[in-house]
Image (cartoon, grey):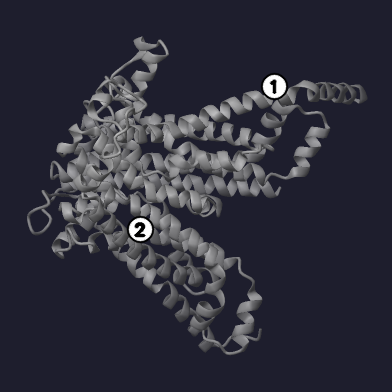
Amino acid sequence: MTTAVATSVARSRWRVAWRPRASHGTVWAVLLGAVALSLAPGLYMVGLSLMDNPQLFAGRIVPWPIHPENYPRAWVASNIGRLYWNSIYVSTVSTVLTVAVSALAGYGLGRIRFAGRGLVYAIVLVGLTIPLQIALIPLFMNLRLLGLINTPLALIGPYTAFGLAFGTYVMKGFFEGLPRELEEAARLDGAAEFRIFASVMLPLTRPALATVAIFLFLQNWNEFLFALTFITEGRMRTLPTGIYALLSSEFYGNYPILAASLVLFSLPVLVLYFFFQQQFIEGLTAGALKH
Amino acid sequence: MGPTSARQRWRRHAAGFAFTGPALLILAAFLLYPIGYSLWLSLHEWDGYTPRWGSFVGLENYRALAGDEVFWRATWNSIVFVVVRTPLEVGLGFLLALLLNRRLAARSLLRTLFFVPVVMSLIVVTIIFQRVYEPNTGLLNTFLTLVGLGGWAHPWLGDPATALPAVIAVSVWKNVGFSLVILLAGLQGLPQDVLEAARVDGANAWQLTLRVITPLMRPILALTALLSIIGGLKVFDLVFIMTRGGPTYSTEVLATMLYREAFELNHMGIASAIGVILVAVVLSIARVQAFALQESREGRTT
């Protein structure tokens, strides 16, 4: 036993002598290679957006000379201003609605023991895992019946609903974690339940609200299937389907313009990501880590 | 607190429903009602245009699917998608998380960069990769030629043999950062005293990783894998934009088949039946997930 320990200590001392350097080199090589792979496609897209067609067809990777005029052309060609506006409008309204409703529901589930609470929570959990494709046909039929196809409401309704399970789930977890004393002090003062929620508890959940809002906004901003099915008129499209429509339009032949549109689409989110990376990462992994 | 009166209890139930009421209403209208509607529709034959749903056909749509080669192809592809994607995504994510889980000067910067594909829109990613795979001037073939492997150049998305692997590769590329972040958080939450004890006992880096860290990480690895499985079964945008299920159904998955049956072929009943099957599969896997998580949680306390 003692000899085993002694040899292993000796071995580890021997390792200390050379190992850190060697393994550090390999680790760095692997990590940098992986980072390069993660970033290469995005950089390739930026490169393409600055080429002209002859450069593209020559199979060039680095654009030279560069053609920044692709950007104003893409802005006009893809009507991206309109797409931005539609996306911002639909995503913001749905996100605000979902955050408000899930804060209420999260409080109800997390802090009030009422009959039927288990059932409500079970519905939320089903909403968290179910493939939304199941709602596609029923929603389409009903939206058509109500004459809502090609209106912002056709997306705001479903987006609000389908973010709700996630929002409620995260908010419930957060409300559960708040200390009881706060609530009891307010209750002794005779505050009504809603007052306790709105003026005592809700202000404390600001970080969770931000997390949920970022996740939902990004999900709405990128949503494709419902936008593809419920919005068929070019003017009403959101960014993802608007960009998708370019693929089947005359601009497909002009790939650099398409690439410039993709960059214009991606830029706002990526800029926000680099400023608020902690919140983004927390928001996108919240569902997984809150277990 | 004193004994609660019946009135207080009643008020508590009422408050509970007042708070969860709006969410419940919305979920009922957009989730429960569509599920019921789809179940009902899956028992009918309907083109989507006649005012009411068409004739009741019982389980005929399910029987038709059972005899439909494309359906089995889509099911098989969905399974392959998940079975290939999940180990790669979790394995590579774990490897990178292990490498990042040390004192590196640029650790937080690297994590930020690895997460970029997760933040990027799937539509953008898909259109870029279409270009990367383009046979003549795409990045992949250009690169292969550049490093002298021109013989490997290939019409990746045009060949039924390579189309599905090519699509899976994009999915892995997009999601590795997600696994990485979850697993890195898990690694950083491991009990330091256990790791230190193993180190003092003379475990080398390999032994530490394989015998100590990996078993401790099993619950989080399982969670990451199951999230990936469920995500993989739901995949739509990626396949729809990149290949539309082609060539010759070689990348057709359940979600793209559902969309095609409903909105290109006007087979609302068949499409609804596919939706019902998809939901049944995902919910049963989620059930297994809940079970596995419970088990691992109980394992942790003992």
Q: Say what amino acid the circle numbered 2 marks.
A: Phe
Q: In this view, does B126 lie above or below A129?
A: above
Decide: is B256 above or below A277.
Answer: above
Residue appearing at x 35%, y 34% in the figure: A45
Relative depth, front residue between A111 and A274: A274
Is any part of residue B240 visible from this angle?
no
Give the quadrant of residue B132.
Answer: top left
Please give the residue where the numbered disc 1 appears in the rendered image.
A22
Q: At 51% across and 65% down in the image, what residue appears?
A: A172
Chain letter of mark 1 equals A
Residue position marked by numbered label 2 in the rendering: A162
The amino acid beneath tag 1 is Ala
First of labels 1, 2 by sequence position: 1
Residue B54 in the image, given as x and y percentages of width and height? 10, 53
Residue B254 is situated, as x and y percent measured from the top left of the image, at 29, 38
Residue reaching furthest right?
Answer: A2
* Rendered location of residue B11, percent (x, y): 49, 84
Give the left or right position of residue B174, taking residue A191 as reference: left
**Between marks 1 and 2, how big is the CA–CA gap?**
50 Å
Q: Badge 1: few (under 14), some or many (20 or more) residues near its Cα, within 10 Å? A: few
Secondary structure beneath disc 2? Answer: helix
x, y percent for residue B275: 28, 46
Q: Is residue A2 visible?
A: yes
Q: Chain letter of disc 2?
A: A
Circle 1: element type: helix
Q: In this view, does A191 lie to the left or right of B259?
A: right
Is A30 positioned to the left or the right of B74 in the image?
Answer: right
Which residue is outermost to the front?
A65
